[in-house]
Image (cartoon, rainbow, N blue to C red):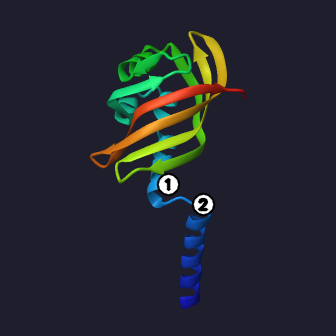
Amino acid sequence: MKTATLVAFVAIFACRFLSGQTSAEQEVLQFERDACKPFVDADVAGLERVLTADFTLTLSNGEVNTRADEINELRSGKVHYDAFENYEMKGRLYGDNTAVVLGKTHVKGKTNGKPFDRVVQFTDTLIKRDGRWQVAASHVSPLEK
């Protein structure tokens, strides 16, 4: 029994060590994966939970969208997402309540009936309030697929 416990402990430690991520970093990256779901599900309430009240999204052309812009776009149905996935992410934590995440997002769907399929590089600034993470600011730039 002691051997099995030791093997389990070593396996857990090795996974954490090899992944190079703390449990807090893993929590942040899982939040980023989960934050995509409201877009695919057209879940306005879910998106409201994910974004801070003062959220801003800076696009590569310099345009800045607010939380209201993002929510209204989702609510309008003008954009429909078949896929919205964050991947190849790296998170950095600053204290217990602030994180910066870099990664890629693949989005696929239709805007006003016209199909799109693209990959963007993103940088998200997250804050933790009342025990849950939210996106306070985001920047995206298109990548070649």
In the picture, the quarter occupied by the C terminus is top right
User: In the image, 29: left or right of 107?
Assistant: left
Crowd rating for badge 1 (residues with CA inside 10 Å; few <14, some 14–19, many 20+): some
The percent coordinates of residue 48 (x first, y second) are 35, 30
C-alpha separation, residue under disc 2 versus residue under disc 1 = 10 Å
Q: Secondary structure under badge 1?
A: helix
Looking at this view, is 66 or 108 the one in front?
Answer: 66
- In depth, the one of 145 and 3 nearer the eye is 145
User: Disc number at residue 26?
Assistant: 1
Q: Position of residue 122 (x, y in %)?
A: 55, 33
Mark earlier in primary sequence (2, 1)? 2
Q: Which residue is labeled 2 in the image?
A: 19
Residue 133 percent location from the top left of the image: 37, 44
Q: Which mark is residue 6?
A: none
Where is residue 5? Give x, y as percent. Answer: 53, 83
Does 113 sit left or right of 76 as displayed? right
Front residue of 92 and 73: 92
